[in-house]
Image (tube, grey):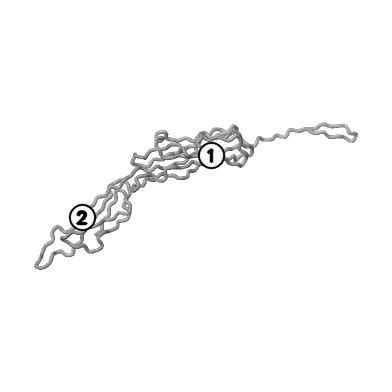
Amino acid sequence: MTGIAYDDEGNPIPCGDEMPIANLETALQCAVKTFGAGDRYIPVLQEYDPTRWVITVDLTNTGGAPITDVVAELELADSSLVALQEFDAGFPDNTNPKGVAVLFPQSTKTFQWGFRLASPNLSGISQFLYYNVKYKSKETPTVTSGCDVPVEIEPVVMPILSCQLMAPDTIYFDVNKHVPSPYDLYVEIANTGNGDAMNVKAYVLQDTRFNILPPAYREYGDLGAEEDDHVR
């Protein structure tokens, strides 16, 4: 920095000094979230719900100077799971990567990608699709990890119910009555499948050889996979 001073006679006197000015800090931060995940398989409908999800990425300039040529790219961390998902053709913009020319200090740019389920998960266990965001700008380095989000795809499951009845082996007729009478009938329901059974009920059908003391049915509620229950 330079300046000019004047003496009493009006003569110019140049003066100057160095004043270092540091560069303004540049920084880019990433945050990612998902809407509509995860995909739950509903056995009674034999379908998934929901079947679509959206990945939302916020890039924020947390520094003190504008940054340019800001880019975000979304990738699936495990390529072996790519067959489970695909870009949603009905989503407005699935350009990948996405970018913005300038991002001013303390401002945020939001990018979104839409996906849908491409095929059912037949592995028997939940699969997690981890979406990773790579991002950079002209003034900041490329960041390839640390900004990711999972989407769970539940496996296709199906309950399998089995029933077992337990009652006295023999009913005797003693003089003028049956023994035992009345008697209890035990019903055991087991779910041997890999999916929950919803609103399970057991009914005893009327026969001409006996009368049913009400109620003729029992409610079990929900019966989880590999779970059993019994009533009488």
Q: Quadrant of residue 121?
A: top left
Q: Counting other residues with Cα less than 10 Å from the Cα at mark 2, is it few (<14), some (14-19), or many (20 or more)?
A: few
User: Above or below — where is 231 with respect to 156?
Assistant: below
Asked whether the beta carbons under mark 2 and mark 1 sit within 8 Å of each other, the answer is no
View extreme (bottom): residue: 176
Q: Which residue is mark 2?
A: 165
Q: Position of residue 146 (x, y in %)?
A: 50, 38
Disc 2 or 1, which lies upstream in sequence? 1
**Label of residue 111 in the image:** 1
View extreme (right): residue: 9
- For mark 1, give the secondary structure: strand
Task: Tell me the quadrant of the picture where the C terminus can be found.
Answer: bottom left
- Residue at x-position 34% and y-position 45%: 46
Q: Quadrant of residue 77?
A: top left
Q: 110 or 227, which is in the foreground?
A: 110
- Residue at x-position 51% and y-position 34%: 95
Q: 201 or 127, which is in the foreground?
A: 201
Question: Which residue type carries mark 1?
Answer: Phe
Q: Position of residue 13 (x, y in %)?
A: 84, 32
Q: Position of residue 10 (x, y in %)?
A: 89, 34
- For mark 2, give the secondary structure: strand
Left or right of residue 68: residue 193: left
